[in-house]
Amino acid sequence: MSRLPEATLVALDVKPGAALESQSGLQMLRPRIYGALQRSGNGAQVAAIVMHPTSNFMGHYLLGPLARRGISCMGLNSRYVGNDTVLLMERVLQDLGAGVRYLREQGFKKVILVGNSGGAALASFYQAQAENLTAHHFVHGEPTHLHPADLPPVDGIVLCAAHLGRSRLLRDWIDPSVIDENDPVAVDPSLDMYGEALEKPYSPDFLARFHAGQAARLAKIEAWVEDRLRQFRETPAGPQDQAFIIYRTHADPRCLDLSLDASDRRPGSVWGDAREVNFSANAMGRTTSLKAFLSQWSSKSQADGPGNLAQTTVPILLLTYTADQSTFPSTRDAWLAAGGRRIINVDIKGGNHYLAGQPELVHEAADAIHAWTGEAMR
């Protein structure tokens, strides 16, 4: 296989955001985002961006494989790379828009978004807003100052191992057994899915109580967040935001009960032992702020994946990794329902969430994207 040119480091200036959204004074004075562009080397006119709200995708596994198939690919990071404590999804749209604009300026005629994992809801949110800008305010009420020029539309969307969005993740993963938000080991044992007394498969009664408990805990946190912000707004010269911790955010019964949403996955989590992840000091939504919670994790988030995808008009490819431990058949079905006639699903059989240790499946995924692009980008 021909040798590709070295990936190019891309540094893009972006509009300033909130005060102290970074601990770097330099980054706040001149906010920049960074990416790695792997060109195809053959003058092809199609380019892809693979981006996640917070993960570093500059070394993404699809960059080289797509470039070898004639699709230049840029792994792009947001300004919140590595730390989503104060992340605002609406601000990430600006960063992704800067990447799309850069590729257009480089002469690429067609640009597609590859939404991998949490990047799927981001890609959907981006294109929905690029086609019809409605996110004029953050969930907490302040103006976003987004403008149509910030969000040049793309020509297609690819979804890989695609989560439905951060608000749905927390809805499905938050541990309902927690009875004290300040103490991760204070629990109601009757709702602890990791309790030794509970047999699997879980009973319908337990699952009903479990999901009701999840909804109740999430609603209680959301109400506290909104009340806290209201207190701050009513306090002269008061604080604008507050950091807080949400303990135990990885309790999805599907991690341990393979009869639920059955697939060819193995028991556990994409990060290892599910119980250990649930207790870990760093997990999904663990450390956040009031405003970031509303934007990312709350029921009021504007970044719901399927809801936004349904508002787009471009062609869509869905790659379902069938052994993924964090997306399931119901996840696939939700995306397919949202995409309607515009979406095509391709199963990557046996694929885990990261295609880790599965180089042959990486090539299979790249082949599927290449074939779809040839058809959809005509």
Image (cartoon, helix red, strand yellow):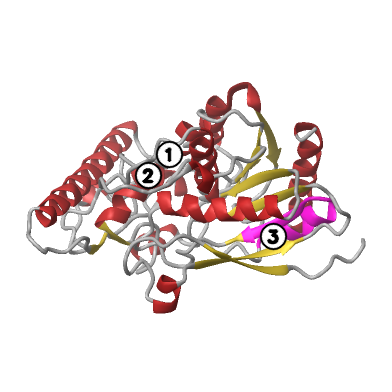
Residue kind at label 1, given as amino acid type: Asp
Structural distance between the alpha carbons of marks 3 and 1:
25 Å
Instruction: State the extent of the magenta-drawn residues as a range.
Output: 60-75
From this viewpoint, which residue is outermost toward the left?
Answer: 235
Q: Is residue 218 left or right of residue 101?
A: left
The residue where tag 2 is placed is 167
Residue 324, x across and y down, in percent: 58, 48
Q: Is residue 126 left or right of residue 277?
A: right
Q: Could you say which quadrant of the image residue 241 lies in?
A: bottom left
Q: Check residue 327 in the rendering and tell me which mark sits there, or answer none.
A: none
Q: Is residue 137 left or right of residue 340?
A: left
**Mark 1: few/some/many CA within 10 Å (<14, 14-19, 20+):** many
Vertical relation: 50 (above or below) 331? below
Q: Is residue 236 magenta?
A: no
Q: Residue at x 80, y 56 (%)?
A: 67
Q: Could you say which quadrant of the image residue 286 lies in?
A: bottom left
Vertical relation: 340 (above or below) 140? above
**Mark 3: few/some/many CA within 10 Å (<14, 14-19, 20+):** some
Q: Residue at x 21, y 41 (%)?
A: 216
The residue where tag 3 is placed is 61
Residue 230, x across and y down, in percent: 13, 50
Residue kind at label 3, given as amino acid type: Tyr
What is the secondary structure assignment of the residue under circle 3? loop
Structural distance between the alpha carbons of marks 3 and 2:
26 Å
The residue where tag 1 is placed is 304
**Residue contact at pointers 1 and 2, CB within 8 angstroms:** yes
Give the mark nearer the N terminus: 1 vs 2. Answer: 2
